[in-house]
Amino acid sequence: MFSGCKNVNDVGEGTCQNGEPGEIATTLLRGRLGFIRREPAEVGVGLEPTFGETVAEFICRGTVTSLPYTVTGSVIVAIVPINGRTSKFTERFRTQSKKEMHGSQIPESSEGGPRDVLFTHHEPERGEMRVFQTGLSITETIANEERLEVRTAG
């Protein structure tokens, strides 16, 4: 669940079909650990839909219209801390804004891995489907019941 969501033009807040304003629920996602880079060590989690290609579907309600959006693809997010036992990890989603791309994720892949990018599918009122690369800018904390360690060296 993401909260505080707004579209790139600040026309309105994104809302999942049955969610509160500004909340977007994702489909069930699975994650895989990998090196974003080995030197200096940076570890990330690749997130992708467990079933199908859809990450989220939601409506952006503005002052005049309500428009549907679908997000597909995958994303990789850096996690910290590494090389120490902890019950809490911080995920930092970062974007590099590109006007023509509506933001691109940093990083876009793990070392030697496939591209992990999100795409938003949007059909404006005129009926022409638009697809554009999408980035997330979020910092969130993941809490585990037990302490875990992500090690980068033997």
Image (cartoon, rainbow, N blue to C red):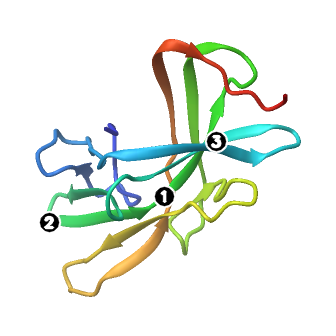
Kind of residue sitting beneath label 1: Ser
- Residue 71, compared with residue 101, is above or below; it is above
Mark 1 nearby-residue class (10 Å; few <14, some 14–19, many ≥20) = many
Kind of residue sitting beneath label 2: Thr
Cα separation between marks 2 and 3:
38 Å
Mark closer to the chain start, 2 or 3: 3
Nearer to us: label 2 or label 1:
1
Cα separation between marks 1 and 3:
13 Å
Secondary structure, mark 3, is strand
Q: Are marks 2 and 1 in contact (CB under 8 Å)?
A: no
Residue 147 place in picture, x, y as percent: 56, 12
Quadrant assignment, res 126 = bottom left
* Residue 148 vs residue 121, the one in the foreground: 148
Kind of residue sitting beneath label 3: Gly
Q: Which residue was labeled with disc 3?
A: 44
Q: Which residue was labeled with disc 1?
A: 74
Q: Which residue was labeled with disc 2?
A: 65
Q: Residue at x 20, y 49 (%)?
A: 16
Q: Is residue 41 left or right of residue 131?
A: right
Secondary structure, mark 1, is loop
Q: Dividing the image into 4 quarters, which one contains the C terminus?
A: top right
